Image: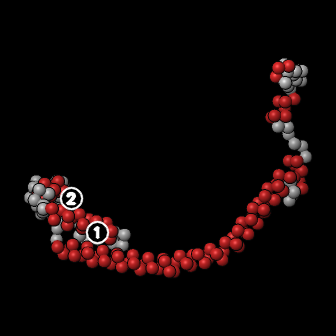
Amino acid sequence: MFCPACGKENPQERRFCAFCGTNLEIVSRALYNHSLSVFTRIDIALDKLIGRYCERVFKNPPGTSTGRKVSDSWKLLGAALLTLGADFVLFWLMLFLFLPLRLITLFVTTPVRLLLEKANRGKAASSTIEVLTGRGQPAELASSWLADPKPSVVEVETEHFPEPHSTKRPAGLQ
């Protein structure tokens, strides 16, 4: 495509002119969209759809550029067939190899894993109790924080409350 501003030739894939920076995509749309037939638009849409499908296997599938070469459409069809073959092989591998293997390993390992989780939960609970009570700690460490417990804020504050007065309820509320 020739740039309308500077007249230099640029590849069809370029969006901007390499020499002056003019937006070539706008120019190409203006030139080609009005003259496209329904069949050409369907062909372009199918190439874009197939190109998106092929992107899962191919990084840059052929025929996804703005150029309208017949050879690119055939290359894109070949890439789609290769992608379809890869999907077919992966489907059967998943169905008959990986999923059954995972199911077997789950059947075998689940009871063992559940027992280990239960044992670990029991150990964690007992170690928490030991830490809170001071068992399993060195004697000087346990005695340093257990020997003279400080009163909590609630205990200190409640010591200064006056004694409750007689709280007799009225006869109608009893």
Q: Earlier in the sequence, mark 1 or mark 2?
A: 2
Coordinates of residue 166 in the picture (x, y in percent): 89, 21
The residue labelled by disc 2 is 15
| Kind of residue at disc 2 | Arg
Quadrant placement of the N terminus: bottom left
- Residue 129 visible in the current orientation: yes
- Name the side, left or right, on which 122 lies relative to 18: right
Coordinates of residue 128 in the picture (x, y in percent): 79, 56
Q: Is residue 104 above or below residue 160?
A: below
Along the line of sight, which residue is nearer the eye, 82 or 21? 82
Q: Residue at x 55, y 78 (%)?
A: 100
- Name the side, left or right, on which 163 lies relative to 37: right
Along the line of sight, which residue is nearer the eye, 69 or 23? 69
**Residue 35's image quarter?**
bottom left
Q: Residue at x 86, y 59 (%)?
A: 136
| Kind of residue at disc 1 | Ile
